[in-house]
Amino acid sequence: MFYNHLKSLQKVLPIGSLIACFLSAGCVVYPELAEKGMKAPKSERCGDCHRDIYNEWKDSPHAHSFTNTAFKEETNTYQFAFCLGCHAPETIFTDKRIEPRSVNLAEGVNCNSCHLNDCKLSGPTAARGPHPIAEKNQFFRTSEMCGKCHVGTFRTWQEISMAEDKKTCQDCHMPAIKRKLIQDDPWQKIYPKREGKQHLFSFQTLFNQNEAPLQLSFKKVTHSDGKIEGSLELENKTIPHTVPTGDYGYREVVVTIELQDEKGQMRECKKESLFVEMKTALQYKEKRCIPFCFNSDGDSYSINATIIRTSFNKDTNILLAEAKYKL
């Protein structure tokens, strides 16, 4: 690391003064970090200093956007060139079609994809560092940035009235955090903690909040004459786009209503799927009721409802919301 190159000079100047001299002089020690094409660096180079952000990114959907099984299958092993630009982009800062990188494709949407702008690295806040840096760019705080690839979802977001005080993509998928931007010496010694964003890029962060963005509730449930009838209300309370959402790939959300006996065993079941293509996706602020009717023989019952995001092969199921009603 750069710290090793400074050891000999530390005998002459304190490390803080030495770093300040380099930064004020505009010294660029690592110009290769802003290279494009065949010389583009791997994201682990960024992780040498930005360790926390790198560790979040490497486990995120962005890091696996090129290598995940669903994308590989749905593009017939990368035969659909149109898809590659957004699943392994060189940079999103272009007025033309986003092109894929020629190297490090397995990194998917990597650091340079979103931070490399005109051979400089940029972000939402002002900074100095040992690589080429552009001026702070408020574009990073807008949903327009995510809309460079997530076109359909961004279009839906745009259609929602601003009077709703709607959240941006970053508000939901990149939770706020206060920390140092750099975790490597010597740079962390001069950088204070500041407000930033976690690089998780996951819809699951929504469901770790206090208020559930999707809610399920039972309405007008009756139990008589050997029948259990009622309806399940779905409500998209705070997600400013449809559920499910997106432009391509398999996007299905399954609502399941189960009648269970006192041992928790399923007696009857009703399922309903939501698809973007079928125009059955749940809209922002929409409430929708799904009626149900089950047979009853007088035993003790409960009704369990779930809403799950699933995959084409049904081998990946992610719980989004659930509710239970005891009869």
Image (cartoon, helix red, strand yellow):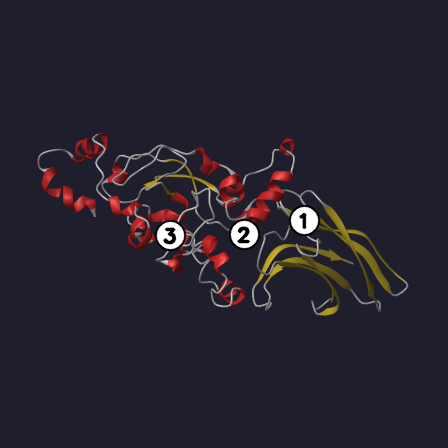
Q: Residues within 10 Å of mark 2 (few under 14, many from 20)?
A: some
> Is residue 262 visible in the rendered structure shown here?
yes
Quadrant of image for the C terminus = bottom right
Q: Which mark is residue 204?
A: 2
Q: Quadrant of residue 194?
A: top left
Task: Point out the tag, 3 or 1, that comes first from the N-terminus.
Answer: 3
Q: CA distance from mark 3 to mark 1?
A: 32 Å
Mark 1: amino acid = Gln
In the picture as drawn, the residue positioned furthest to the right comes out as: 225
Describe the element under mark 1 as helix, strand or loop.
strand
Q: Which mark is residue 313?
A: none
Mark 2: amino acid = Gln
User: Mark 3 highlights which residue?
Assistant: 55
Q: Which mark is residue 215?
A: 1
Describe the element under mark 3 as helix, strand or loop.
helix
Q: CA distance from mark 1 to mark 2?
A: 15 Å
* 3 sits to left or right of 162: left
Q: CA distance from mark 2 to mark 3?
A: 17 Å
* Front position among marks 3 and 1: 3
Residue occupying image coordinates x 23% and y 39%:
28
Mark 3: amino acid = Asn
**Residue 136 x/y as whole percent:** 38, 33
The correct choice, above or below, for 65 with respect to 120 in the image is: below
